[in-house]
Image (cartoon, rainbow, N blue to C red):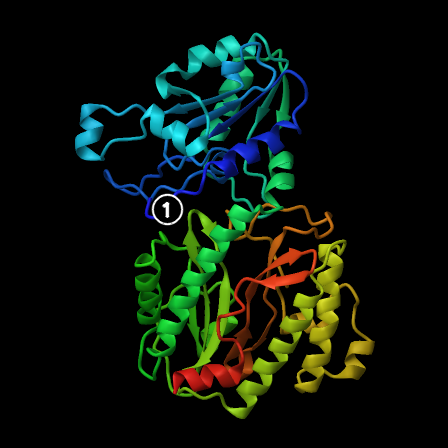
Amino acid sequence: MKYTPINNSLYISNRKKFEKHLKPKSIAVFNSNDIMPTNADGVMPFRQNNDLLYLSGIDQEESILVLFPDATNPKFHEILFVKETSELIAIWEGAKLTKEAATKQSGIKTVYWLSEFDKIFEALTKEAENIYLNQNAHLRADTTVQTRDDRFQITCREKYPSHQYEQLAPIMQTLRAIKSPLEIDAIQQACNITEKGFRRILEFVKPGVMEYEIEAEFAHEFLRNRSRGFAYQPIIAAGCNACVLHYIDNNQECKAGDVILMDVGAEYANYASDMTRCVPVSGKFTPRQKEVYNAVLRVMKSATSMLVPGVIHNEYHDEVGKLMESELIALGLLDKHDIKKQDPKNPLYKKYFMHGTSHHMGLDVHDVENRERPFEVGMVLTVEPGIYIQEENLGIRLENDVLITKEGQLDLMASIPLEADEIEELMN
């Protein structure tokens, strides 16, 4: 890993919070992610399971975390299983975590080699009544590929059918939604690295550059600042490409008169950032482009002020939709007489603003969440309204990452240039 490890007090605290949600005599099991193959002997870059990482800080493949707070022997309250280094592994891949290093990173005193898991886990099940198993239960989860957690769930239920089984996902959704100070520091670091990338490209963009060249400038700045790279597939979309919400080809020329929509974010210590900015290729917005830009900016600022404790997510988005409706009327894109006759379940503004205003962010860029849970202090959400006008080859989206505090909103990207005039000034 490139990043400086987070202090293990974060993971010790996270486990204490987690254990309060378990039923008596319960074991919870978390598996690392797989290393996914490409072709021949190639593999994709490893990305740790975020739930295991949240509770242990262990950023290594083939790891298992077992939590059993009611175990008779206190030694087994928290157990970490990690891959043992062989001479072959050490030569070809480099040494894996030692038991001492695993303890230092996680704060877990009991560490075994992975090869010892089956025997120890079987002994522990004789004391337990409930087994909590993990699963990717995100609203947008793609479960086509079977994970280590999925495979363990199958074998565990077959081997221990008499136990009561519970799901870990609801607990993790509850806990991970509230960010601790150390997590906020990591997210802020990711945002700061993203800012460096954005300021770099403001000096680079000009007519004739390719979208992928801009992507490369971001990547350079991210990597040189100890980020693993992008927190998600970057969107560098010039002109009409900006009207494709998840455009990731990034292979077209940026032409004079175009506006480039850039939805990018650096990752730091596995925590995401998520920024969207729009800049004029020629260094100056046309009057119409600036008019649309400022309309989106007004909605963004108003939406940010609505992020307060007690607000329900879906109700918040509905209110933002009303603001957007007014801006679209002023831009001549909607007619107020048509709006009076619109279907309330399918408002007309969705033709130009068809996605959500905000999503939770943390270890996942679209972090685990419960849409029915009111906003609370400690939650981090994006704010990202947009207007997409295909007939004008213009898409404008603006996005910052915002922490809800007792005093109001803390914009973690407040130092990143946002006003249209400031962007023009910096580009020129």
Quarter of image, res 42: top left
The residue nearer to you, when weighing 350 against 258, is 258
Quarter of the rendering occupied by the N terminus:
top left
Quarter of the rendering occupied by the C terminus:
bottom left
Measuring from the top left, give residue 182's x and y in whole percent.
Answer: 51, 46
Measuring from the top left, give residue 16's x and y in whole percent.
Answer: 59, 30
Measuring from the top left, give residue 87's x and y in whole percent.
Answer: 18, 24
Residue at the spot 75% in from the left edge and 72% down from the top edge: 322
Q: Give above or below for 55 relative to 138.
A: above
Residue placed under numbered mark 1 in the picture: 4
Residue at the spot 60% in from the left edge and 53% down from the top edge: 360
Q: Is residue 42 visible?
A: yes
In the displayed orientation, state which residue is furthest to the right: 340
Residue at the spot 69% in from the left edge and 50% down from the top edge: 371
How crowded is the residue under tag 1: few (<14 C-alpha within 10 Å), some, or many (20+)?
A: few
Measuring from the top left, give residue 49's x and y in whole percent.
Answer: 46, 38
Q: Give above or below for 73 relative to 367.
A: above
The residue nearer to you, when weighing 257 against 26, is 26
- Secondary element type, mark 1: loop
Q: Is residue 62 visible?
A: no
Question: How many numbered marks appear?
Answer: 1
Q: Name which residue type carries label 1.
A: Thr
The residue nearer to you, when weighing 233 against 69, is 69
Quarter of image, res 340: bottom right
The residue nearer to you, when weighing 87 against 280, is 87
Residue at the spot 38% in from the left edge and 29% down from the top edge: 102
Q: Give above or below for 20 relative to 426.
A: above
